[in-house]
Image (tube, rainbow, N blue to C red):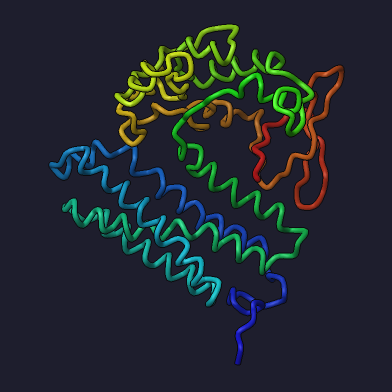
């Protein structure tokens, strides 16, 4: 007998899921596992090093080994899910991740901790498997909202911390590709139109940068914090091309702000102190907690409503229906 695509998810073949809401909720919890495992270790590397009587550099292998193993195993696990039951592969991965998590929580050996993190790397395959299951089990009209919930869970669960906090601006010429280079299309607005908003966003995010970058990206104001220290490679590049190489603007604190510590300028985000890097929660936490604010997941923003060139609300789609919100905090998911 030849196994067909319709039976491979192991959740119901061609028929749509009987309880799509339950399926989406369950897969969202699975995706949340990915987000937590990706980000939870980084802030506590110093504590782990102290508890294991090891150096921070040695303990950082708990992160490095995890990423290397994820790069190697994710495509293999994805292929297994394509060839066999996605449900069985998903559950097997969860068992492996559970074993790795228990080992990581109970071991007092750095070697075993690294092995545990390698086992946890299998979790990186959970998101693509979850997406594949949704595609097989849900009707097309439910896919957009389901994908929004899944990706929103990944982002709000930890994805906003899974970045290096580099925050460059577009160059003025990027808005005039057709005029300057003869390719693409020119933007309907220019760099000068966006510049005040770039500046405001950098102030909110406490972006640290060097004002000499204004040679390439004109600025109406300086960066709020001082620039990060140049690495040895950056110093060599700056000496060779002073008008073209600059310290990359980053949303990592150079000086403490409130309860957030300062980045230690190791040229590696792994070693930044806890909360040094901008995330949605450490900056917008009070806003999100406000009773006047709703974080609407599972929504697809269709258009921004305007009046006299001023944004007055958003038109969005949720569960196949369109709505208009005059005031809302919408986290779009792609």
Q: Residue furthest bottom?
A: 1
Front-most of 229 and 263? Answer: 229
The quadrant of the picture occupied by the N terminus is bottom right
Query: With 70 as the anchor, is 298 left or right in this view?
Result: right
Q: Which residue is drawn at 30% across and 52% down?
A: 65
Q: List x then y, in percent, for residue 41.
A: 33, 44
Q: How many labels does the image show?
A: 0
Q: Please say whether residue 49 is visible from this viewpoint.
A: yes
The quadrant of the picture occupied by the C terminus is top right
Q: List x then y, in percent, for residue 174.
A: 66, 25
Q: Which residue lies furthest to the top in this view?
A: 221
Q: List x then y, in percent, for residue 131.
A: 60, 60
Query: With 70 as the anchor, is 114 left or right in this view?
Result: left
Q: Residue at x 47, y 21 (%)?
A: 249
Front-most of 5 and 282? Answer: 5
Query: With 136 as the anchor, is 47 left or right in this view?
Result: left
Q: Residue at x 45, y 16 (%)?
A: 209
Q: Please say whether residue 258 is visible from this viewpoint.
A: no
> Vertical placement of 245 versus 271: above or below?
above
Q: Residue at x 21, y 37 (%)?
A: 56
* Residue 289 occupies quadrant: top right
* Residue 73 occupies quadrant: bottom left
């Amino acid at each position: 007998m030849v196994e067909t695509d319709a039976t491979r998810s192991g959740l119901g073949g061609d028929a749509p899921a009987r309880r799509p809401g339950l399926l989406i909720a369950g897969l969202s919890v699975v995706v949340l596992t990915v987000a937590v495992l990706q980000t939870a270790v980084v802030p506590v590397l110093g504590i782990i090093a102290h508890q294991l009587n090891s150096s921070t550099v040695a303990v950082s292998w708990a992160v490095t080994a995890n990423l290397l193993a994820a790069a190697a195993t994710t495509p293999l696990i994805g292929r297994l899910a394509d060839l066999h039951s996605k449900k069985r592969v998903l559950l097997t991965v969860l068992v492996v991740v559970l074993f790795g998590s228990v080992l990581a929580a109970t071991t007092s050996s750095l070697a075993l901790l690294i092995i545990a993190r390698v086992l946890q790397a299998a979790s990186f395959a959970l998101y693509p498997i979850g997406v594949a299951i949704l595609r097989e089990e849900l009707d097309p009209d439910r896919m957009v909202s389901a994908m929004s919930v899944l990706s929103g869970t990944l982002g709000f669960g930890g994805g906003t911390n899974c970045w290096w906090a580099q925050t460059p601006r577009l160059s003025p010429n990027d808005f005039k590709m057709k005029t300057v280079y003869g390719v693409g299309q020119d933007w309907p607005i220019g760099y000068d139109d966006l510049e005040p908003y770039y500046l405001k966003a950098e102030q909110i995010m406490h972006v640290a940068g060097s004002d000499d970058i204004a040679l390439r990206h004109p600025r109406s104001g300086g960066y709020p914090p001082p620039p990060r220290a140049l690495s040895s490679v950056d110093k060599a590049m700056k000496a060779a091309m002073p008008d073209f190489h600059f310290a990359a603007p980053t949303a990592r604190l150079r000086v403490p702000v409130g309860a957030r510590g300062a980045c230690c300028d190791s040229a590696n985000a792994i070693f930044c102190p806890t909360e040094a890097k901008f995330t949605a929660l450490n900056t917008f936490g009070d806003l999100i907690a406000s009773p006047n604010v709703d974080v609407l997941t599972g929504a697809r923003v269709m258009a921004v409503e305007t009046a006299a060139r001023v944004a007055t609300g958003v038109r969005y789609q949720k569960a196949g229906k369109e709505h208009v919100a005059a005031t809302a905090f919408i986290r779009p998911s792609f």
